Image (spheres, coloured by chain):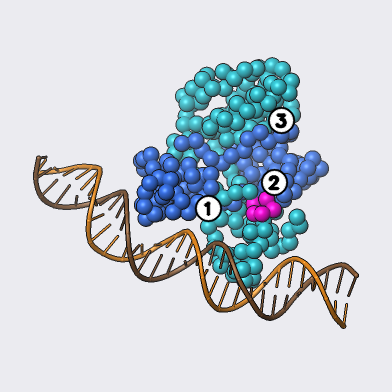
Chain colours: A blue, B cyan, C orange, D brown
Amino acid sequence: MKLDEKDLQILKHLQRDSKMTNKEISVKLALSITAVYERIKRLEREGVISKYVALLNPDRVDKAFTVFCQIKLIQHTKDYLTRFETEVTSLPEVLECFHVSGEYDYILKVLVKDMAAYREFMVTKLTTLDHIGSTQSTFTIEKVKNTTAISL
Amino acid sequence: MKLDEKDLQILKHLQRDSKMTNKEISVKLALSITAVYERIKRLEREGVISKYVALLNPDRVDKAFTVFCQIKLIQHTKDYLTRFETEVTSLPEVLECFHVSGEYDYILKVLVKDMAAYREFMVTKLTTLDHIGSTQSTFTIEKVKNTTAISL
DNA sequence: TTAAGAATAGAAAATTTTTCCGAATATGAA
DNA sequence: TTCATATTCGGAAAAATTTTCTATTCTTAA
């Protein structure tokens, strides 16, 4: 699907604030409300926009501690990989998990309350998974930037 | 601010799909529309909900390549740190940047089109920043999980 | 138990989304 | 170029949702 300049403008706005009304957007783009509406529907239909979500303030829900955890598996058979991936996906503390190149196999972004909660997570959840080799945790001291908006 | 079970339910729904109407939520929670409305407004006012955004499908906007880039600064004076943080924040390819413990000072999540674009990003943007010591790039082979929903 | 404040429900008002349809514009083949 | 087709657009009406308002119910502390 090809996106013209107006589509990109719409996406930029909605990435920043999805509560903007079609009317507000239409004013910014010098288009009619209907034109904006149809374009957004098309972007949703075509899967350019995948979903609309509310973002929470982690501090306010007692999840102020972010940890990047790198994991090495013992073996790399397809079976082990998919098993690990299924299990890690089911862990709510894990917001992100990527299969990566380099010394470790996976990198996880984990959100918990504090160091004690992270220890609990490691001991009772992560290391109980089968076939885990070694892990390395990198603790975040400060969140410098954290956006969901892709540059267009 | 203390959140009761109904607040948490509302947050869970809105984290998954912020287009849910107050009516739909009110049915799920066995509350009136107004009650749901007032609770959401309070959650917004108190900063529990920080914003509403549209999430895009990276493939569809030609940003299918995710790289984790770890960075070491040459010096760690406050001035150098804040200068680096300001500059890195302004880079649209960088979705996330955390100041971290461990061997490296920062970990960045970078979104670009492909390897060539990443090289371009490295050469023309990252390494031109002052006071950068060494960097290490970890390329993602597959996105296993990537959610914005904090477990409540 | 009672009074004050907060939360709730229902109805009305305001706003927004969605549909509908004709007009304008763009696209592509002859 | 010209025509036919399809796409996009704009405005109005309809439908749905949000927001406000008011009265009632529920909590909680005195």
Give the x, y percent position of residue B24: 56, 66
Say if B125 sits above or below B35 in the image.
Answer: above
B103 horizontally vs B51: left or right = right
The image's mark for residue B34 is: none
- Dot 3 falls on a residue whose secondary structure is strand
Of residue A69 and residue A104, the one placed in the foreground of this image is A69
Classed neighbour count for the residue bearing mark 2: other residues with Cα under 10 Å, few (<14), some (14–19), many (≥20)? some
Q: Which residues are magenta?
A: B44-49
For the residues bearing labels 1 and 2, Cβ distance under 8 angstroms:
no
C23 horizontally vs B83: left or right = left
Tell me how many marks there are.
Answer: 3
Give the x, y percent position of residue A5: 38, 39
Look at 44% across and 39% down and name the residue there.
B61
- Dot 1 falls on a residue whose secondary structure is loop
Amino acid marked by disc 2: Pro
Amino acid marked by disc 3: Val
Amino acid marked by disc 1: Lys
Give the x, y percent position of residue A44: 43, 51
The image's mark for residue A19 is: 1
C-alpha separation, residue under disc 3 versus residue under disc 1 = 33 Å
Q: Nearer the viewer, mark 3 or mark 1?
A: 1
Question: Could you tell me which chain the residue with mark 2 belongs to?
Answer: A
- Residue linked to disc 3: B100
For the residues bearing labels 3 and 1, Cβ distance under 8 angstroms:
no
The image's mark for residue A58 is: 2
Label whose residue precedes the other's in the sequence (1 or 2): 1
